[in-house]
Amino acid sequence: MASILLTGGAGYIGSHTYVALTQAGHDVVIIDNFSNAGRGVPGRLARITGAPVTCLEGSVLDAQFLDDVFAKHSFDAVVHFAALKAVGESVEKPLDYIETNGQGLITLLRAMEKASVFRLVFSSSATVYGIPDETPTPETAPRRAINPYGFTKIMGEEVLEQLATNDARWAFGTLRYFNPAGAHSSGLIGEDPGDTPNNLMPYIARVATGDLPQISVFGDDYDTPDGTGVRDYIHVEDLAQGHVLSLDALLRSSQSHLVNLGTGQGYSVLEMLSAYSAACGRDLPYKIAPRRSGDVPIYCAAPEKAKKLLGFEARRTLQDMCSSSWNWVAQRPRGN
Ligand code: WQD
């Protein structure tokens, strides 16, 4: 059992990781500024885990706030989610992304060093691969920043590599997510984008509930089996388990690791639509729309390294992702 600080722990992936970490026996404190998380999430986490939740409101950019939190707790490690993560928004607000994702990480690392906490699991993204030359994409593929969001994740990875290489006190677990999807089996937490969703599954979910009229399929002329974009969707509960395994590895040794978290299986937009229709029990209206700028035909993880290093293997299916998402949105409390 370890004492863990979970930054951004009220967010989509953070909240599911909170559940997985507490169920693995860890003692977890959440910090979150609620810029992209509902204020009702900590209460629902308490219902899922059956125990009180310590969630402190504040920003990873606030050095004094962080020092106060570290002074009150004796953490063994940090799992760091608190960041901005919308590719399109990053193009509009690059400095916001560099400040929050870049400076936020550095401020957090400073607070950790002052408190002699030298283990961190870092939330990275397949976006660091830019437009990959090969798919499935291995961790050895070059990093290419094709948008400010991806740049900030590459910057974060390189900062951690510099620290670990030059200061043996540090060890990091860098996790490159592919496409998180789905919701917790309880239906109490899930993806809850405040405004109109950018990502495919939450958008489909809003059409399934009738909040949006139809799905726009961004291009059907890609070099893929049915012409629509293919992505490696991974159930958010599998993703959360990947964080538990990464943390355990860091607590056992001083070795850093960097792995993809994906399934290795890609699904197209039309396949996702069909799976979601089966989950919600009705055909969902869609139209073929122009390609979205910045999209690539296929993103798919080579998952072997995570299995070899961490024993990680995604278990849940696309149908599990769709049915858990539908179970969540059908009962989701509006607005929190
Ligand atoms: C998936 C597919 C779209 C919406 C993004 C970020 C990435 C990561 C995951 C943070 C694509 C198509 C989508 C729609 C559609 N986030 N689509 N109609 O772009 O693969 O990855 O989220 O780490 O960094 O880039 O995910 O869900 O937006 O798109 O046809 O209304 O669905 O073209 O083929 P993406 P997505």
Image (cartoon, rainbow, N blue to C red):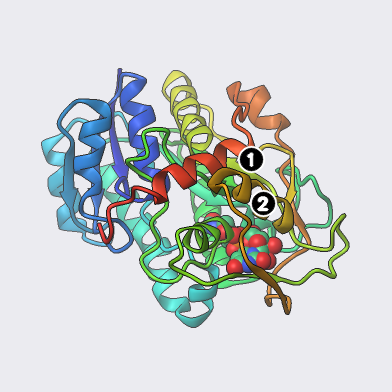
The residue at which mark 2 appears reads as: 272
At 61% from the left and 51% from the top, the residue drawn is: 277
Measured as percent of width and height from the top left, residue 126 is found at 63, 52
Vertical comparison of 222 with 129: above or below? below
Vertical comparison of 126 with 48: above or below? below
The residue at which mark 1 appears reads as: 318
Q: Is residue 289 left or right of residue 221?
A: left
Classify residue 154 by image quadrant. bottom right
At 22% from the left and 43% from the top, the residue drawn is: 42
Q: Quadrant of ligand 1?
A: bottom right
Q: Relative to the observer, which residue lies in front, 67 or 132?
A: 132
Measured as percent of width and height from the top left, residue 81 is found at 39, 49
Q: Are marks 1 and 2 in contact (CB under 8 Å)?
A: yes
User: Element at badge 2?
Assistant: helix
Q: Which mark is residue 39?
A: none
| Type of amino acid at the residue the image marks with label 2 | Met
Residue 49 in view: yes
At 63% from the left and 24% from the top, the residue drawn is: 309
Q: Relative to the observer, which residue lies in front, 177 or 204?
A: 204
Q: Is residue 48 left or right of residue 13?
A: left
| Type of amino acid at the residue the image marks with label 1 | Leu
